[in-house]
Image (cartoon, grey):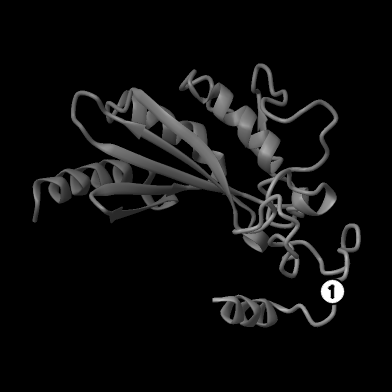
Amino acid sequence: MTPAAERNARLAAAWAVRFDAQIHTAQSLGQLTVDVGHEDWVAALTFARDELGCGFFDWLTAVDELDEGFGIVAHVYSLEEGHHLLIRTRVPRAEPVLATATGVYRGANWHERETFEMFGVVFEGHPNLKPLLLPDGFEGHPLRKEFVLAARVAKPWPGAKEPGEGAGGAPSRRRMLPPGVPDDWGPAAPAAPRGRAEGDRREDRGHGD
């Protein structure tokens, strides 16, 4: 067993003593991952900071797991011992509410605001849970998987629209919709000239050589 694996085994044992069967631990790429129930979220982060020496807060974000809800992930680190912990929990999609971690790690403040804004997860007890990145009046949560990625559909992209298409007025290839955009969404794309498919243009270029 490598030194990192031995260290992670000791950390996993400490988690088991503190939380018993309420948590699940696993090792991946030299790092210990700890899954806890949402009701133990703040207690788990406090334990990592106070008992395991993880005083450095790195980041916090969410993962849209569709019907399973939203996974919340926090990465913390011990500067003294050199070990990392990835602490995870999950909140239901119908009611994505989780206690704030700002009372444990002040650095979680902006991370929770961003996660609230992008995923719609409410961090209960946060001192200032306001939008951080998006413009005023923006509706929806852009990192939810059902959010339509429609920027290029609603407004044409400035400059060249496709690789190789410049200002010379060459016909554009068939317009591709971004992921998640329904086929019938947005303004209708102009019809391509008849007889000018991509294969035809390649043949024209070949005859000109």
Indicate the amino acid at tag 1: Pro
Quadrant showing the N terminus: bottom left
Instruction: Give 155 or 146, whichever is nearer the viewer.
Output: 155
Image location of residue 91, percent across then percent down? 62, 48
Q: In this view, does 9 lie above or below 39?
A: below
Query: Does residue 1 appear left or right of residue 51 in this picture?
Result: left
Instruction: Give 14 or 55, whichever is nearer the viewer.
Output: 55
Farthest residue, direction right: 187
Q: Is residue 186 above or below residue 143?
A: below
Circle 1 packing at 10 Å, graded few (<14), some (14-19), many (20+), is: few
Q: In this view, does 199 lie above or below 98?
A: below
Q: Which residue is pictured at 41% across the width and 27% down the height?
A: 46
Query: Does residue 152 appear left or right of residue 186 in this picture?
Result: left
Query: Total marks drawn?
Result: 1
Image location of residue 101, percent across then percent down? 53, 27
Quadrant showing the C terminus: bottom right
Q: Which residue is pictured at 41% across the width and 50% down the height?
A: 23
- The secondary structure type at the circle numbered 1 is loop
Instruction: Give 134 or 89, whichever is nearer the viewer.
Output: 134
Residue to which mark 1 is pinned:
193
Instruction: Give 94 or 129, whichever is nearer the viewer.
Output: 129
Q: Which residue is pictured at 79% across the width and 49% down the height?
A: 156
Q: Which residue is pictured at 88% across the width and 58% down the height?
A: 186
Image location of residue 143, percent across then percent down? 66, 47
Q: In this view, does 68 lie above or below 3?
A: below
Query: Does residue 140 appear left or right of residue 160 in this picture?
Result: right
Image location of residue 98, percent across then percent down? 62, 37
Image quadrant of residue 201? bottom right
Query: Does residue 100 appear left or right of residue 8 in this picture?
Result: right
